[in-house]
Image: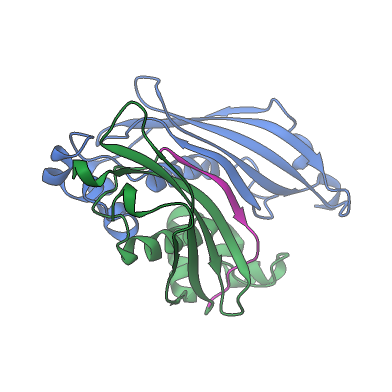
Chain colours: A green, B blue
Amino acid sequence: MYFDDLPVGFQYESDEITLTEDEIIAFARQYDAQPFHTDAEAAEQSIYGGIIASGFHTMLVAFNLWLKAGIWNEASMGSPGMREVQWRRPVRPGDRLRIRAEVVGAAPSKSRPDRGRIEVRTDVLNQADELVMSYTATHILKRKHAA
Amino acid sequence: MYFDDLPVGFQYESDEITLTEDEIIAFARQYDAQPFHTDAEAAEQSIYGGIIASGFHTMLVAFNLWLKAGIWNEASMGSPGMREVQWRRPVRPGDRLRIRAEVVGAAPSKSRPDRGRIEVRTDVLNQADELVMSYTATHILKRKHAA
């Protein structure tokens, strides 16, 4: 879909994906090597009482659920940024995550008629329907007539 | 260092790290499989004129430069979020990145005397001293007397 197909109010909800302890630890060892992400014993002594996923890992899982939905992939020209990235609840091994995304802003470019920008708010929910993370990302998308 | 050692105005600048094309493509295949991150030919035809790094990759490289500096690692209790994540310039294979970070906010917890929160603005610069990315992250840190 192109810029013109994704107006404010467009919604998408994904299937679930399960995060295993091995995946959580492997990601964190490479990208966020803090003890409560990588070391079961240290994590037990932490305020979290056990291993939790790196927030960056949760973010990438969420973004991949979006990418795999194939909503704007043809039209994507990249992103200038994100705002209000919030980690609200720990993600633990075995949690099943899904995203609920909604277009909350859309504006054609004033200077470049071949593109527009949309803002997508993404909520990441767990198997208990609790909000574990949210963020709002801006995406630059090709317009239909320019494709 | 603990909450009390990191007042507003504290600054840190890292050494450089080089991003190779192989690393950029490997990361993107796993976490951000868009053609301008993964496919040299498609990237040449895109508005970027060649492979660019996933913004998430740049973010994780920056965060790891911070972690490896070992500034608050003993005190870290996690993060509730980030704001103003901005990707300002493409990062290309061979680019040398470094971070310049500054504490821009610090407040002890009102309800929990063992901790406080700091806000760290991180600028990611390339070898030409151009700003390629910036973000402001909140971190919950133990206080010295509670450690």
Q: Image quarter for residue B129? A: top left
Instruction: Tell me: residue B87, above or below residue A91.
Output: above
Residue at (43%, 64%) from the top-left corner?
A: A61
Query: What residue range appears in magenta?
Result: A80-93
Q: Image quarter for residue A16? A: bottom left
Q: How many marks?
A: 0
Question: Residue B43, position in %: x, y?
Answer: 18, 42
Question: Residue A93, position in %: x, y?
Answer: 54, 76
**Residue A88 shown in magenta:** yes
Nearer to the camera, A124 or A26: A124
Question: Residue A26, position in %: x, y?
Answer: 43, 65
Instruction: Tell me: residue A56, above or below residue A23.
Output: above
Nearer to the camera, B54 or B66: B54
Left or right: where B135 falls relative to A16: right
Left or right: where B30 falls relative to B107: left
Residue at (71%, 40%) from the top-left corner?
A: B118
Left or right: where A13 falls relative to B67: left
Residue at (42%, 46%) from the top-left corner?
A: A118
Q: Quadrant of the C terminus of chain A?
A: top left
Nearer to the camera, B4 or A69: A69
Nearer to the camera, B135 or B73: B135
Left or right: where B57 falls relative to B119: left
**Residue B35 appears in the rendering:** yes
**Residue A91 shown in magenta:** yes
Q: Image quarter for residue B32? A: bottom left
**Residue B2 appears in the rendering:** no
Q: Quadrant of the N terminus of chain A?
A: bottom left
Question: Residue A20, position in %: x, y?
Answer: 47, 76
**Residue farthest to the top?**
B128
Instruction: Tell me: residue B68, above or below residue A120.
Output: above
